[in-house]
Image (tube, rainbow, N blue to C red):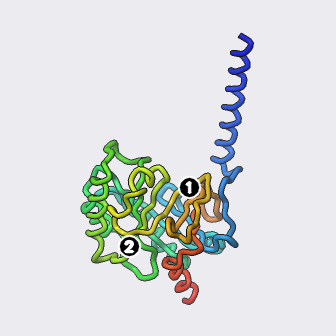
Amino acid sequence: MKKEVQRAVLGTAILAVASAFYLAYDFAMVRFNHPSVRDYPIQGIDVSHHQGDIDWKRLAAQPNVRFAIMKATEGGDHKDTRFARNWQAAKQAGIVRGAYHFFTFCRPGREQAQNLLATVPKEQGTLPIAIDLEFVGNCDKVPTVEQLSAEVKAFVAEMKSTYPGKPIFYVTQEFFDTYLKGNEFRFPDHYLWLRSLFKEPEQQKCGRWSIWQFADNGKVDGIDGPVDLNALCPEETGLATLFDETAAR
């Protein structure tokens, strides 16, 4: 009985410590990854309607907000309610912009691309279109690698005439391991935007990833509440040219 009580007390203590760490992280009191601007000079945010009203001028004054990737569309017909105003306001503030589409497993890829094309203006000096590929928030269907790659190919092919460059794939580590790892040849050529909240991904001269999402509870001046924080791989020369062009204007 004594050992059982001890085990119960130990279990309760472990649970309490784990809960404390989770709450501390959730309220941004603890950061497992917070790369410096010195090591990662090009940093930015990604936003959607969840961030509410954004003061883009205040954002632009901060060295760690040089780009913003904003949600534009989801599935075959959903449009983010704040995309149009965020797109224009970020441009006026001088922040490099990008748009992303949340890819659902339950709608054809071609149809989803048409939704994006009808929503995102084609402009110079913007990041490539990002395709958000993840399980969280998706529909119940779980496609095979072959099924998913076919629909993603259809999506990219549909938008090629307007956006001929390679897209950005946003993935969690779980999604990468399930679909992309070892199957890259099945998918269109892409930049990789990797979510990794607790571990800095190995750079490998950006052979594996181009953008690193390192926090989902960031705090920045100009946004009330948490926001996702990201960093461009220092070796990623392709996307970095956009920031050189912006600085030269």
Count neighbours of disc 1 (C-alpha within 10 A) and say few if under 14, some if 14 to 19, many if 20 or more: some
* Rendering coords of residue 197 (x, y %): 59, 53
In this view, the residue in front, 69 or 171, is 171
Count neighbours of disc 2 (C-alpha within 10 A) and say few if under 14, some if 14 to 19, many if 20 or more: some
Quarter occupied by residue 59: bottom right
Q: Which residue is mark 2?
A: 166
What residue sits 49% from the left and 79% below the top?
A: 238
Alpha carbon distance from label 2 to label 1: 22 Å
Q: Amino acid at mark 2?
A: Lys
In this view, the residue in front, 83 or 206, is 206
Q: Is residue 248 above or below residue 79?
A: below
**Residue 196, numbered label:** 1
| Residue positioned most to the bottom | 248
Q: In the picture provided, is 208 more to the left or to the right than 3?
A: left
* Rendering coords of residue 243 (x, y %): 55, 80
What residue sits 44% from the left and 69% below the top?
A: 191
What residue sits 68% from the left and 42% below the top?
A: 21
| Residue positioned most to the front | 182
Quarter occupied by residue 5: top right
Q: How many marks?
A: 2
* Rendering coords of residue 226 (x, y %): 59, 54
In this view, the residue in front, 37 or 143, is 143
* Rendering coords of residue 147 (x, y %): 27, 53
Q: Amino acid at mark 1?
A: Ser
Pick whichever of labels 2 and 1 is earlier in the sequence: 2
Badge 2 element: loop
**Residue 157, numbered label:** none
Q: Is residue 246 above or below residue 48?
A: below
Q: Pick the quarter of the image with the N terminus.
A: top right
Q: Pick the quarter of the image with the C terminus.
A: bottom right
Q: In the picture provided, is 20 more to the left or to the right than 202?
A: right
Is any part of residue 10 visible from this angle?
A: yes
